[in-house]
Image (spheres, rainbow, N blue to C red):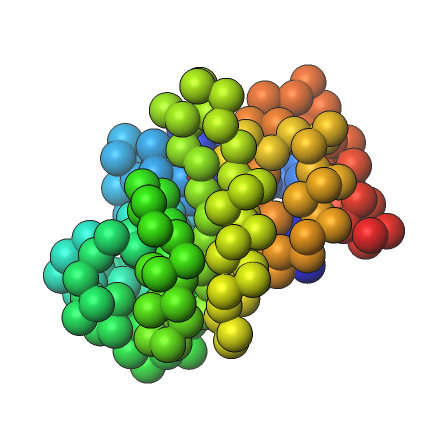
Amino acid sequence: MKLQLAIDLEDVDGAIELIEKTKDSVDVFEYGTPLVINFGLEGLKKIRERFPDITLLADVKIMDVAGYEVEQAINYGADIVTILAAAEDQSIKDAVAKAHEHGKELLVDMIGIQDVEKRAKELDEMGADYIATHTGYDLQALGQTPLENFNKIKATVQQTKTAVAGGIKEDSAPTIISQQPDLLIVGGAISTDDNPAEKAKVFKDMIDNA
Ligand SMILES: O=C([C@H](O)CO)[C@H](O)[C@H](O)COP(=O)(O)O
């Protein structure tokens, strides 16, 4: 199981500072959607130039023109690119093909999908690298968590790796870690802590000791 740090709340220099502080404990750094919106792929490129060896995920949440957009994210430094599970099957297939053509990975984000078992089964056959259960900020605000959907998706997929995100905190992490996702995605719980380096290590130790 790997730890991904979602960087959503910073500007690009803040993201660089956060990566510097946490890189001993974090396996994958997410260039979050708010950074994509505010600074585009140029921000991703700046981070890649500063850290040539880290694993970088671009949370571009693609919906269409998938092959082109995956390729652009890769050209600007991404190792893993995200697409929404609600995209057309053809878009998912194009995205998988383009990521794999470059030796990179595709993560499909299940945010907003209602029948998660049906869609996870379909996606599992399309060759994506990860299917991510994701409770977005807007539903976190209503008290929702990703655990129930994660368990359904985990029980459904045969070959695709699983990821989970959405308000995972120190106290909720052990339960979700016990369900063995391949990628545990944590954002605010690390990035807004007074000591992000120490907090990232807490999550990494939980994973390593599970
Ligand atoms: O993907 C995310 C969200 O849609 C904003 O872009 C977050 O990175 C994801 O939810 C993880 O962050 P936390 O919920 O703060 O752990």
Q: Residue furthest left?
A: 65
Q: Nearer the viewer, residue 27 or 14?
A: 27
The residue sitting at 62% across, 56% down in the picture is: 181
Q: Quadrant of residue 89?
A: bottom left
- Using residue 95 as the reference point, say whether residue 20 is left or right of it: right
From the top left corner, tell me how far across and down residue 12 is, in percent. Answer: 41, 34
The residue sitting at 78% across, 37% down in the picture is: 202
- Using residue 53 as the reference point, say whether residue 176 is left or right of it: right
- Using residue 130 as the reference point, say whether residue 118 is left or right of it: left
Q: Is residue 42 visible?
A: no
Q: Residue furthest right?
A: 209
The residue sitting at 26% across, 42% down in the picture is: 40
Please tell me whether residue 136 is drawn above or below residue 120 in the rendered image. Answer: above
From the top left corner, tell me how far across and down residue 38 is, in percent. Answer: 27, 31
| Count of number-bearing discs | 0
From the top left corner, tell me how far across and down residue 130 is, in percent. Answer: 47, 63
The residue sitting at 45% across, 42% down in the picture is: 134
